[in-house]
Amino acid sequence: MGKRINNGDDTIEVCGDLANKVCRIKATGSSAIIVALGCVSTAIIAVLLMVPSAASGPGFVTDGFLASTTAAGAVAIWGVPVTITALTIGLGARNKNVIKTLYYDYDIVEKKSGSIILKRNKYRQF
């Protein structure tokens, strides 16, 4: 899903449990989304910058600690399952801004039983 958002796909169909979690992300209020996006973006950066090697040792642990503590703000807003989903989407796309793009650039245009259809909003002026 993250790669499709990164590619700027116009329409994305999301099925199953992922659809419910995307709906929770999209339903977040404007104040809370700023905190959640900041926390998730920082955690994604920390994970992407982790370089496991014998020489890095304590640095790897510190980066992992940073990633887990920065995600705590998003957990307070979304809960653990949705935060893990947001981190997974961002890490899959290797882009810290993919959840921001999902929130602001895509609208839920159709809800079916067990799936949703997202359509890219062409009129966003950011």
Image (cartoon, grey):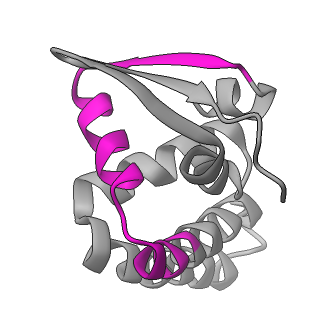
The answer to whether residue 94 is above or below residue 97 is above
Residue 21 or residue 53, whichever sits in front = 21
Q: Position of residue 76 (x, y in %)?
A: 27, 79
Farthest residue toward the front? 123
Q: Looking at the image, which residue is at 67% across and 32% down? A: 5
Q: Quadrant of the C terminus?
A: bottom right
55 lies above or below 119: below
Segment colored magenta: 9-37
Q: How many marks?
A: 0
Image point (47%, 74%), residue name: 30
* Residue 96 left/right relative to 80: right
Residue at 76% over, 65% down = 49
Q: Quadrant of residue 12?
A: top right
Q: Residue at x 44, y 84 (%)?
A: 69
Q: Position of residue 64 (x, y in %)?
A: 53, 74
The quarter of the image holding the N terminus is top right
Looking at the picture, how far across and down is residue 125, in whole percent? 83, 54
Residue occupying the far left of the picture: 113
Q: Main secondary structure of the magenta part?
A: helix
In the rendered image, residue 91 lying in the magenta stretch gets the answer: no
Q: Is residue 109 above or below residue 48?
A: above
